[in-house]
Image (tube, rainbow, N blue to C red):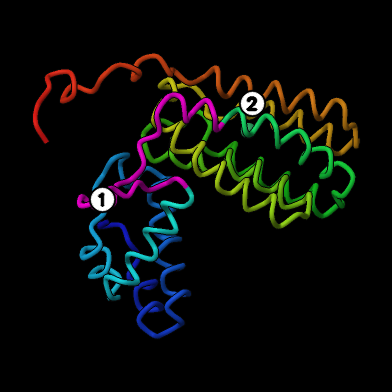
Amino acid sequence: MATMNIEHLKIIRTGGSVEDRAQTIRDHLRDAIVDRRLAPAAKLSESEVGALFNVSRTIARAALQMLAFEGLVRIERNRGAFVANPSPEEARQVFASRRLMEPGIAAVACERATARDIEAFRVQLGEEARFIGQRGPAARRAEIKASGDFHLLLASVAGNAILLRFMEELIARSSLVIALYGKSGASSCGHSEHVDILDALEARDVPRMNNLMIRHLDHLEADLDLRLKEGLGLKEALNLPG
Ligand SMILES: [Zn+2]
């Protein structure tokens, strides 16, 4: 929580409706979760969130409920809210959903992309390339975020606001899954595959775009190690109380 930006706290203090303020807090917490500044399963206390943002517990609770609805926070009765800790099965379902949605999004984007959109993709790929080969958790987080942004840009070019919202949720969940289960050192999203997808988009080659997207999502999932964490946690294995 120490990384929260004081400038934004001031903005929240100066007003906005209850919904707006809850939304702003939700945005900050979401970024912190997706960027792994808040660890999976970390406790998110309403009073602490409220104090940090200088809002009532009611507003803090509304923000946490928004995140719970998106699958990034888990709320347990009598225990409070925690950063989600997706199971291997949930991880598989996230990628199964993406395989159903993204080839369709790619096809629509192929029809609608303008020259300016293509330029925006080039800028995005440049951003991604900056983090490749860099070591350390900060570079890894930045790389996961940049590679997710490529997929969100495709959804935004497809021009369907409802699909874009679905994709925002799926990409946020994917980032959490990749951060949890990604094999260390492996790229979160093959950069060269994004380049190929962009080439197909520019050529407006829908079948090639579909193939590339499915293969890309397969590779992403194959890069996860969903076996390691499938067993019981240490605490459960030792049968400790609480
Ligand atoms: Zn990708």
Q: Pick the residue in front: 195 or 154.
A: 154
User: Compared with residue 91, is residue 227 higher up or lower down, i.e. above or below?
Assistant: above
Count of picture labels: 2
Quadrant assignment for the C terminus: top left
Residue appearing at x 39%, y 30% in the figure: 180
User: Which SS class for mark 1?
Assistant: loop
Q: Where does residue 179 sit, x and y in percent of width and height?
A: 42, 33
Q: Please name the amino acid that badge 2 sits on.
A: Leu
Please name the amino acid that badge 1 sits on.
Arg
- Bounds of the magenta segment: 71-94
Position of residue 221 relative to residue 19, above or below, is above
Mark 1 surroundings: few (<14), some (14-19) or many (≥20) residues within 10 A: few
Residue picked out by circle 2: 217
Q: Quadrant of ligand 1?
A: top right
Residue 133, x across and y down, in percent: 50, 28
Please give left or right for residue 87 compared with residue 114 in the image.
Answer: left
Q: Name the residue under label 1.
A: 77
Q: Residue at x 26, y 44 (%)?
A: 42
User: Residue 239 appears in which quarter of the rendering?
Assistant: top left
Quarter of the picture containing the N terminus is: bottom left
In this picture, residue 182 sits left or right of residue 212: left
> Residue 133 shows which numbered tag?
none
User: How many angstroms separate mark 2 from mark 1 (CA)?
Assistant: 35 Å
Q: Where is residue 200 in the image (x, y as percent from the top left)?
A: 84, 32
Q: Nearer the viewer, residue 163 or 189?
A: 163
Callout in the foreground (2, 1):
1
* Ligand 1 within 8 Å of the CB at mark 1: no
Instruction: Judge whether 121 appears above or below 191 on screen.
Output: below
Ligand 1 closer than 8 Å to label 2 CB: yes
Residue with the most extreme front position? 77
Image-quadrant location for residue 228: top left
The image quarter containing residue 226 is: top left
